[in-house]
């Protein structure tokens, strides 16, 4: 029999001392998944590596420079902003580095360093911190940065160096058109696309085309996207529905008039669709929270992308489409609340 | 395998204690029996300082239907009606302090032998109430109330809950393995009370030995059902949904869909009460976690001090959190000077690296909480409203449907204490409606 009887005050006091505990007290639950925000951001960065490597392979050191400047400037600008405004510095969450990488991948490899820095400045301060920092920005910061640059510096933003093997990079690379740009030019000049050059599918699938340094290889981006889905960072809803919407809409138009509208396979591999569908539209903060909402959001992205590509002034519409749909996210979230348990359906 | 929608897969961690046979906790010299160990109306002590009490003797009188008495865990003398920290509220609460005389002598006529199946439904319900039986899974709702559905509710399903979906804990598992007859016979008594011919005993598939044993032992009218391993599989509403496909209506009770759920431990307590007249004075508790030196499953008297239990299990080792219950829904304690209660299914001691004490950050709207929520809510919205104390808006967003299972909080990558915000909002909402 165990005896811890304590009937006199001295013993009581000793017992009290002995039982003084130094422990944490908080609400349940007391255990937590190891997958935190920095882990998620790291996974997305890992998933972007194949696309970035293809960019560096075809565009050489300038592409690498844009990536490094983008990532470093975003992190530094976020830290500086938070220091100046007296807020806690949150660069360790990895979101600024990811924004920098995404911005860089949406820029031409020939972008000068100051252009990248301006893009970072807009992305981090105006698009992200003005709204309250991570989690509170309604629009995808990297896309806001990119679109700001596209509108403000149209020439620099549409000067596309020609892709070449990393091992045969010339000092001053020639520039050319993107596949979608060539298409648009052909339509403007001839009214049909039959004269458009470079309409093969294999080059844009592998990445041997002009374009933003991170968007050129559909294959590399799909690999990264599959990684994100397998890691359960994103669900299939946005990329699959987005891509399917573009395929269906361009497919219908192509069947109606293949002289004016390019075939859907070309629309899938050309331009920024894969980068947008797997990495930009899936940004958690700026996309709907439920799977149903994601489907609606992705259909909207796909439809607007097709409208801009086929009838808009710009050859490519992915960035605008995602930004426009970002604005609808609060409405979509409101309309797609899950049915709670215990309600007669 | 049957299951429900939503939920999470935290590490099970049951290996620490699941193979340790139940050991009897030795008799203590003093017990602190909390008067309020159940959910519902209070009870009032019926003994006073100096009274001699025998093991199993009533110590309190329930005030109201939804209330039960507590009983002396051993024989001895009442030292005082004192106060001790209540593990659920964290506040000082009345308790009967008993100095044991070491004889551990039963009250007169106990334990008795009788055939519960020869007793009437009313007699059985009365015995269950006077024996102080409450839900032993942790919620501690008086069992006789759950077994007395109003006349307009037809009960057609009785489920014995052996899911034990909380990580770490193995008390129900050990009970089913070592004393299956108490569980099954108690279940049959409850079937009689409910007037049912059939019952289901539901066990998560991570306890194959218990499933096999129950399969062998269970009479034909009790069906054994293996459930997918997923938290919170053992939550009442999710369990009913998994087994029957029915959804307990929002704001309703299991009886609204014709179901009654009783924990395996509760069934055993019902058997003791009805067949042997033994009130609920002891229970099986898993003392586990990496912060305790020797994890054990103990049969411990209600009223035993936590400090003694910890000493019996080799003491603490780098303890950062001491929890009554499991890691998902258990309550963190700030002192060892609290006593074991009827609902203490586990004492979990976590080290700093086993628990989660980092700061939280802004919601990134990843939607993981929405996927995890078994109740179909949007926990991220509730957590944002919680930060601002906006309880009315939270009620509009189904605050009151939250069962506080913690799945959302477990998966939140921003580490947001969503359950904490929900509890805070519910308290604000209660306070506001009390004012009206």
Image: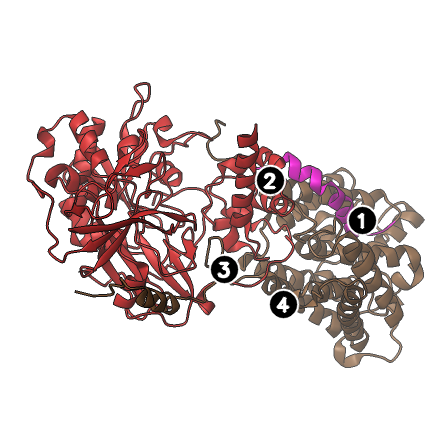
Chain colours: A brown, B red
**Chain of the residue where label 4 is placed in the rendered structure:** A
Front position among marks 3 and 1: 3
**Picture coordinates of residue A119, whole percent (x, y):** 84, 62
Residue bearing the label numbered 2: A292
- Viewer-side residue, B198 vs A130: A130
Residue A80's disc is none
**Picture coordinates of residue B131, whole percent (x, y):** 20, 38
Depicted A333 relative to depicted B286: above or below: above
Instruction: Indicate which disc, 2 or 4, sits on the residue closer to the N terminus.
Output: 4
- Give the residues in magenta: A314-339
**Chain of the residue where label 2 is placed in the rendered structure:** A
Instruction: Indicate which disc, 3 or 1, sits on the residue closer to the N terminus.
Output: 3
Instruction: Indicate which disc, 3 or 2, sits on the residue closer to the N terminus.
Output: 3
Residue bearing the label numbered 1: A320
Q: Are marks 1 and 2 on the same chain?
A: yes
Return the residue found at the far top.
Answer: B152
Q: Are marks 4 and 1 on the same chain?
A: yes
């Amino acid at each position: 029999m165990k005896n811890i009887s304590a009937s006199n005050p001295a013993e009581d006091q000793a017992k009290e001392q002995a039982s003084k505990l130094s422990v944490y007290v908080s609400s349940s639950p007391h255990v937590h998944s190891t997958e935190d925000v920095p882990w998620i951001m790291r996974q997305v960065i890992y998933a972007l590596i194949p696309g970035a490597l293809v960019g560096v392979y075809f565009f050489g050191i300038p592409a690498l420079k844009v990536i490094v400047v983008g990532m470093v400037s975003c992190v530094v600008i976020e830290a500086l902003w938070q220091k100046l405004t007296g807020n806690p510095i949150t660069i360790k969450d990895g979101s600024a580095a990811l924004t920098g990488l995404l911005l860089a991948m949406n820029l031409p490899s020939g972008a000068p360093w100051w252009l990248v820095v301006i893009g970072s400045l807009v992305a981090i301060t105006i698009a992200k911190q003005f709204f309250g920092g991570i989690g509170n920005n309604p629009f995808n910061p990297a896309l806001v940065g990119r679109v700001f640059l596209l509108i403000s510096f149209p020439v620099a933003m549409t000067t596309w160096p020609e892709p070449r093997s990393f091992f045969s990079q010339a000092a001053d690379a020639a520039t050319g058109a993107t596949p979608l740009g060539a298409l648009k030019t052909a339509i403007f000049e001839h009214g049909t696309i039959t004269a458009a050059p470079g309409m093969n599918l294999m080059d844009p699938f592998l990445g041997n085309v002009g374009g933003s340094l991170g968007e050129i290889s559909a294959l590399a981006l799909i690999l990264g996207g599959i990684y994100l889905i397998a890691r359960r960072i994103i669900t299939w809803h946005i990329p699959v529905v987005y891509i399917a919407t573009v395929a269906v809409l361009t497919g219908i138009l192509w069947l109606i008039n293949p002289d004016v509208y390019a075939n859907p396979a070309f629309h899938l591999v050309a331009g920024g669709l894969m980068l947008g569908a797997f990495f930009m539209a899936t940004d958690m903060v700026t996309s709907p929270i439920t799977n149903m909402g994601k489907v609606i959001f992705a259909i909207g992205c796909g439809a607007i992308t097709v409208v801009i590509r086929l009838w808009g002034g710009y050859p490519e519409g992915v960035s605008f489409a995602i930004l426009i749909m970002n604005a609808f996210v609060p409405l979509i979230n409101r309309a797609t609340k899950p049915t709670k348990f215990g309600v007669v359906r | 395998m049957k299951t429900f929608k939503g939920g999470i897969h935290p590490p099970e961690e049951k290996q620490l204690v699941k193979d340790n046979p139940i050991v009897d906790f030795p008799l203590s010299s003093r017990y602190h029996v909390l008067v309020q160990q159940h959910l519902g109306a209070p009870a009032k002590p019926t003994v006073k300082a100096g009274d001699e009490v025998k093991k199993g003797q009533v110590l309190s009188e329930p005030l109201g239907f939804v209330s039960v008495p507590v009983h002396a865990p051993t024989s001895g003398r009442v030292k005082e009606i004192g106060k001790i920290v209540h593990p659920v509220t964290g506040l000082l609460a009345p308790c009967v302090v008993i100095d044991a005389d070491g004889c551990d002598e039963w009250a007169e006529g106990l334990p008795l032998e009788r055939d519960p199946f020869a007793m009437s439904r009313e007699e059985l319900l009365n015995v269950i109430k006077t024996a102080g039986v409450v839900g032993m899974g942790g919620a501690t709702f008086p069992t006789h109330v759950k077994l007395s559905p109003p006349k307009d509710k037809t009960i057609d399903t009785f489920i014995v809950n052996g899911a034990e979906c909380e990580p770490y804990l193995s008390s129900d598992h050990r009970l089913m393995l070592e004393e299956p007859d108490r569980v099954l016979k108690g279940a049959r008594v409850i079937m009689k009370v409910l007037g049912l011919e059939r019952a289901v005993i539901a066990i998560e598939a991570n306890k194959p030995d218990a499933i096999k044993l129950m399969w062998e032992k269970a009479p034909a009218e009790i069906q054994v059902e293996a459930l997918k391993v997923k938290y919170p599989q053992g939550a009442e509403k999710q369990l009913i949904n998994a087994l029957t496909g029915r959804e307990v209506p929002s704001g309703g009770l299991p009886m609204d869909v014709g179901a009654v759920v009783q924990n395996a431990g509760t069934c055993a307590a019902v058997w003791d009460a009805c067949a042997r007249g033994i009130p609920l004075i002891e229970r099986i508790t898993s003392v586990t976690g990496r912060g305790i030196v020797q994890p054990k499953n103990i049969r411990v008297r209600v009223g035993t001090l936590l400090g003694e239990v910890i000493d019996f299990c080799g003491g603490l080792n780098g303890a950062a959190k001491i929890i009554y219950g499991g890691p998902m829904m258990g309550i963190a304690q700030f002192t060892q000077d609290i006593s074991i209660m009827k609902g203490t299914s586990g004492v979990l001691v976590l080290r700093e690296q086993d628990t989660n004490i980092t700061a939280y950050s802004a919601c990134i709207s990843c939607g993981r909480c929405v996927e995890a929520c078994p109740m179909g809510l949007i926990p991220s919205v509730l957590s944002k409203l919680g930060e601002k104390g906006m309880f009315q808006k939270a009620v509009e967003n189904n605050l009151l449907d939250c069962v506080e299972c913690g799945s959302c909080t477990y998966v939140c990558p921003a580490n947001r204490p969503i359950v904490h915000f929900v509890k805070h909002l519910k308290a604000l909402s209660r306070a506001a409606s009390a004012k009206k």
